[in-house]
Amino acid sequence: MDAKAGKMEFGAKAHVALNDPKLRANFRRAMDGLMTKRAAQFSDQEEWEALRARGAGVRARALAQLPQLLERLEANCTANGIQVHWAETTAEANAIVLGILEAAGARRVIKGKSMVTEEMHLNAYLEANGIAAVESDLGEYIIQLAGEAPSHIVMPCIHKNKVEIAELFADKIEGQVYTENVDELTAAARAALRGSFAGADAGISGVNFAVAETGTLVLIENEGNGRLSTTLPPLHIAVTGIEKVLEKLEDVPPLLSLLPRSATGQPITTYVNMISSPRKPGEKDGPNAVHLVLLDNGRSRVHADPELGDTLRCIRCAACMNHCPVYTRVGGHTYTFTYPGPIGKLLTPQLEGLDCAGDQPHASTLCKACAEVCPVQIPIPDLLVRLRTEAVRPGAAAAVKGGGSSASVSESLGWAGWRLLYASPLVYRIGTRLLGWFGNLMPASAPMLKQWTSVRAKPKFAPKSLHELAREKGFCDE
């Protein structure tokens, strides 16, 4: 994607989304339900604060030891029979997955839900190389039929209502008649996917947590498709970002309590899968081979920053998205990139570069709703402000990829003038008097006003300052 096009795309897409009443209604209805369910799960404020502090501690401790834990994870996975691969970029990760599939002669793939493979655009890559990949998560399956990307990291098709899904199924699934009955639509998807599970040469999944202590891959889900994708095919490939590692198996339970309650308002997901090895002699199910692909794609650079490294604590629950007044009105596709919402505004500019996604940190009211509901205490508003600073920080001083891309000489001069105005009483008095005399003569399209007046009324300058009015009334001396 062209950097300038990507940078300007959010604003244009947001205007389109804001004028789509059906999209707005779909999101409002879904988000109201999710927020209500989450609030019911954390009705005890003391329990919530204690649990999220524990969750934040688990993630912070893992990130503090990230290089060592990754090496320990590799050693224990290898000892368990899981083959570990390292990828610095998404291109390398795609090539590794393709190489594993080709070596196994696999041409048909069934996929469990995975945001990292979305980040890699793996499906399109495999298709271009003659391998068919079918999404098995119901939401992912729906958007795959629609030819769309996920609009939410937990519920990919949350932007669609049942009428849209009914029309899609009738059009895309052979022999399917139009019905708006949710149970019948679910049964139609199940029937269509059964053959894909049975005929798959390989299964691909994401990873919720990777436990270094035991070499265990933890996956949670509600539909059973994840278990089928990782157990039924003879080959399982798990793909994850390097930040998903945990130190100990005992670190998993608090996160298992936080994640589903924050994400969907459930006390626990239907399935919790723990994979520590391929099928062993005498076992009746499981893949013959398991591979783990660890993707960096800029995460090491994020981790190296003492402040922005907190971004990597994220456990992908999407609670921040569900409570965000921006996301809930414009939807996930407005963000262009894989990760939308508050966490996307943090992660995307750091992975893709501020020169490519530098507008996203500004798509926030800084209301702090995201920070209040984050189960691992990521200070999202503070980090968004940091990214805004990095976007205008002069070149060499910038600490983020693409930093300084929004630096402007005119803006710098404007702030220098503001500092001078407020640092000197004499200059302030002269400046305010000039604004009172001539400020209202400036047109709304003036360079210093046009961004403000594009969405707001033009400010009206008072003919006299407060100090002048006070002096006239005799409340202060000249």
Image (cartoon, rainbow, N blue to C red):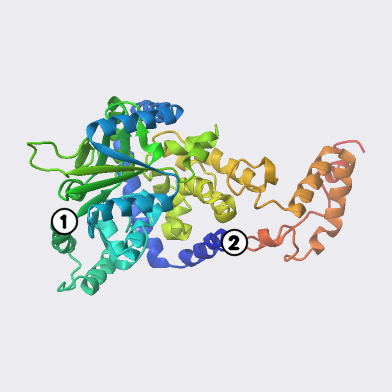
**Residue ID at (19%, 73%):** 178
SS for callout 1: helix
Closer to the camera, 375 or 399? 399
Which mark is nearer the camera, 2 or 1?
1
Q: Quarter holding the C terminus?
A: top right
Q: x%, y% of residue 153?
A: 36, 50
Classify 6 as above or below 424. below
Above or below, 77 relative to 21: above
Label 2 sits on what residue type? Lys
The percent coordinates of residue 358 (x first, y second) are: 58, 52
Q: Badge 2 is on which residue?
A: 4
Frontmost residue, 386 versus 293: 293
Q: Position of residue 230 (x, y in %)?
A: 20, 46
Q: Quadrant of residue 164?
A: bottom left
- The residue to which callout 1 is attached is 197
Q: Residues within 10 Å of mark 1 (few under 14, many from 20)?
A: many
Residue occupying image coordinates x 73% and y 66%: 445
